[in-house]
Amino acid sequence: MRDSISFINGVNSKNKSSWEELYSYFYAALCNYSSKITKDKHTSEDIVQSMFIRLWDSNVIFNDLCGLTAYLYKSVYSRSLNFLRDNKKGLPIEPDAVKNELSLEERYIEMALEEEIISRFYKALEEMSPQQREIILMTLRGDRVDDISRKLSISPNTVKTQKKRAYTFLRGKLGASFVVVKFLLFTC
């Protein structure tokens, strides 16, 4: 994503290329987030599409990327819960459901943050050298240094060096979120 100030200004002014970038950056993560709530992929796609349309038609102005991201996830969260509510009419309410509502909302917020961090991780991967990207992706699949070395026809030391450089690059791009990425993606 280009610098956040020009991006936010473009979103606020309904600039077509900024909106294409907005859609490309957030669509998949928002669909995945909604799908975890609704358990319905097609419905989730509809929810995210309608949220983008409503946002386009609105006069909402964002001051920064953080505010935009929070708005998108909160909107999708609310719309996903509305879908569940509207399609469960007539079903009995479980007594524990009311008590657990707050913890459920907290879990959905955690899921949104995880989706955003993972999305940022994959965007950062696109900026790496092809060799570093391949080594990181193979590491994610569970390949060990010797396996990666053999498959890529490079020395184990080269794998270690490139992996270390890739981690340094990711730490720089993701900041404190890198710890979350390591926990979410690199631990089995």
Image (tube, grey):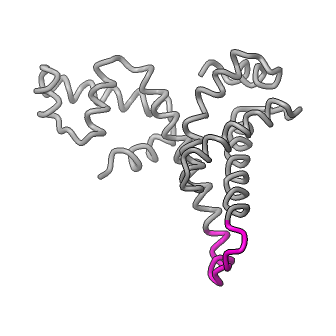
Point 52% across, 33% down: residue: 120
Tell me the quarter of the image containing the N terminus.
top right
Say if the magenta span includes residue 97.
Answer: yes
Q: Which residues are magenta?
A: 88-103
Point 68% across, 39% down: residue: 69
Question: Is residue 59 rendered to the left or right of residue 158?
Answer: right
Q: Give the image quarter of residue 108.
A: bottom right
Q: How many marks on residues? A: 0
* Residue 92 location (% of width, % of height): 67, 79
Question: Is residue 171 rendered to the left or right of residue 15?
Answer: left
Question: Is residue 170 rendered to the left or right of residue 130?
Answer: right
- Vertical position of residue 9 compared to residue 188: above or below: above
* Residue 107 location (% of width, % of height): 58, 61
Point 61% across, 41% down: residue: 45
Q: Give the image quarter of residue 65.
A: top right
- Vertical position of residue 164 compared to residue 186: above or below: above
